[in-house]
Image (cartoon, rainbow, N blue to C red):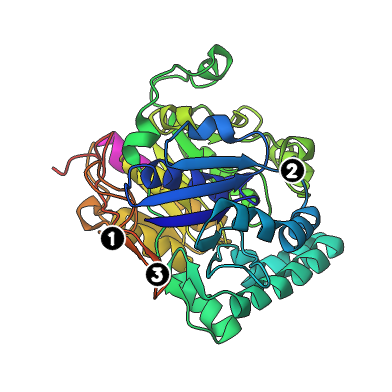
Amino acid sequence: MISLFINALSASAGGGLTYVRNIVPHLATLRDVEATVLLSRGFWDELGVWPNIKIVEQLERSGTSRRFLFEQYSLSNLIRASGANVLVSAGNFALRNAPVPQILLSRNALYTSTDFYSDLRTRGEYRLYLDTRVKGWFAKQSVEIADVTVAPSQAFADELVNWTGKQIAVIHHGFDNELFSRDSTALPSTMSAQLVFKPGCLRLLFVSHYNYYRNFETLIRATARAADKLGRDKIKLLLTCKLKSEDNPGSYRAESAAQLVRALDMQQNVIELGPVSYRQLHHIYRASDLYVTAAYCESFAHPLVEAMSTGLPIVASDISVHQEICGRAAVYCPRFSDEAFSEQIVSLSASQQKRVRHPALDFAALPPERCQISPATKAHRGIDRNQLILHSSFLVRPRGRAPPVSV
């Protein structure tokens, strides 16, 4: 029997929370594993009750500094009390003087992103720039401290190796399609009403809270360009967020994106759905025609996997992580080229209308270990006490909506 302590205090939004949602139910199926999962208050009800999983809630959702201080000065006592013999630090920062061997999951690509730092300078976000530099220093030190550091993609692992000079293990996050699509509860009526469009309207989807590195502005400009070609009433961009700073986590200011929507007269084309429950998110994918992302910085990108699980064609920025995760199941554009994105969107729209497969897309060539797991696979192949490596055996199978047939 192996006993894990998973420190997931940092899982409050985005990929960190999605990672916890997927891994906990699979750990619960393993007879030779028990786990204590440390979360911020408010997420326990999302994970359910399992006989071999103990959920510990600590702290309200708070800033990185408060969490870091708690981890460094109070976490060791919780680990000892749990009886764990392996610590999994799932939030980029390792615990100094950990009482048990420690696996660090490093998944924040902002610390190594020159694009992000350049973007912050351009926006005049000097406080956030300094904050990211400081956190990056601690994240780099954490790689030194941990017994093993794990990255969720080979592309990001290569960045970490260049940054730290240390050996980095690669374990793709994986994805449980059965869990993702299990909930049949209908969307709230107010949200469903926002998804009713005229026949023939192309529905683009982008799943993210607002932040700078997901490059919303390029997508908005690309949608406007595509609308000029297809017709203003023929295209919608669905966002799972509101373009208001106070409605998004972190200190990102969304007003510039909202102003861009107004300047381009795209208020009727950009649909701000707001946050969608993870259990109901599959409904949004299946109500869409294309998935689009112009993100210039990622370490894994769960929404791409979710999109592939529902058979959505994908237009993505050409960063290495996207190409690793999607392979030939996506078409790629330079990350800051709204013109290139609009051309691919229009091209894919034409392919869908003719019900033919876009020549650049090949769903049969999905990377076999990187995206969504079939119901028969397990999320765990074993935990080796000597190597201290968590192994996964995720298998890709596109499910849900079928891609257009070739003719």
Mark 3 or mark 1, whichever is nearer to me: 3
Outermost residue toward the top in this view: 189
Q: Nearer the viewer, residue 133 or 5?
A: 5
Q: Residues within 10 Å of mark 1 (few under 14, many from 20)?
A: some
The residue where tag 1 is placed is: 367
Tell me which numbered mark, 3 or 1, is placed earlier along the sequence: 1
Q: Are marks 3 and 1 in contact (CB under 8 Å)?
A: no
Read off the magenta span: 348-354
User: Does the magenta segment cover residue 352?
Assistant: yes
Q: Nearer the viewer, mark 2 or mark 3?
A: 3
In 3D space, how far apart are the residues under numbered discs 3 and 1 (Cα atoms)?
29 Å
**Residue on which disc 2 sits:** 59
* Residue ID for mark 3: 385
Mark 2–mark 3 Cα distance, whole angstroms, equals: 30 Å
Q: Residue at x 42, y 36 (%)?
A: 51
Q: Secondary structure at mark 1?
A: loop
- Residue 344 location (% of width, % of height): 41, 51
**Residue at (29%, 42%) from the top-left corner?**
351
Q: Earlier in the sequence, mark 1 or mark 2?
A: 2
Specify the farthest residue to the left: 407
Using the image as rendered, state which of residue 387 and residue 81 is in the foreground. Answer: 81
Name the amino acid, label 1.
Answer: Pro
